[in-house]
Amino acid sequence: MSPRADRRAPGRGVEWEFQRLTLPRELSRNVVTRLLVERAEHGGWELDSVRVSPDGTRRVVLRRKIIRLRPTLHLAPQI
């Protein structure tokens, strides 16, 4: 399994972080499901796409929103 993360902004005002996983064919469907559920519950990831190649290797793309915090306290200049 080899994760790779990158970022892109598909829509206005929303930024996503992506993580690509390559899962070997030896992993059962139940193991893959548990792995993806754990990443969703504990890492905030959601499933973007899954591709199964002819040799049985799964290529999974996960995504999660990037939340930017903006400062809310603006101090007035002192005189």
Image (cartoon, helix red, strand yellow):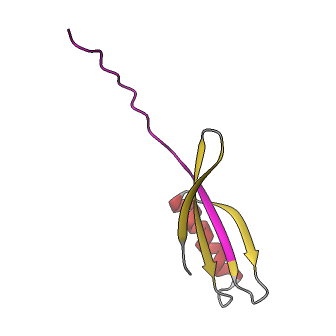
Q: Residue furthest right?
A: 54
Counting labels gives 0
Q: Is residue 55 above or below residue 5?
A: below
Residue 33, x across and y down, in percent = 66, 74
55 relative position to 63: left or right:
right
Residue 43, x across and y down, in percent = 51, 60
Q: Residue furthest left?
A: 79
Residue 40, x across and y down, in percent = 58, 62
31 relative position to 53: left or right:
left
- Residue 56 sits in quarter: bottom right
Viewer-side residue, 33 vs 49? 49
Q: Quadrant of the C terminus?
A: top left
Magenta-colored segment: predominant secondary structure:
loop
- Residue 75 sits in quarter: top left
Q: Residue at x 56, y 81 (%)?
A: 1
Q: Residue at x 60, y 70 (%)?
A: 20
Q: Which residues are magenta?
A: 59-79
Viewer-side residue, 33 vs 65? 65
Q: Residue at x 56, y 67 (%)?
A: 38
Q: Residue furthest top?
A: 79
Q: Residue at x 58, y 47 (%)?
A: 15
Q: Is 51 one of the magenta-colored residues? A: no
Q: Is residue 68 above or below residue 33?
A: above
Q: Is residue 31 above or below residue 45?
A: below
Residue 25, x across and y down, in percent = 68, 88
Q: Is 65 one of the magenta-colored residues? A: yes
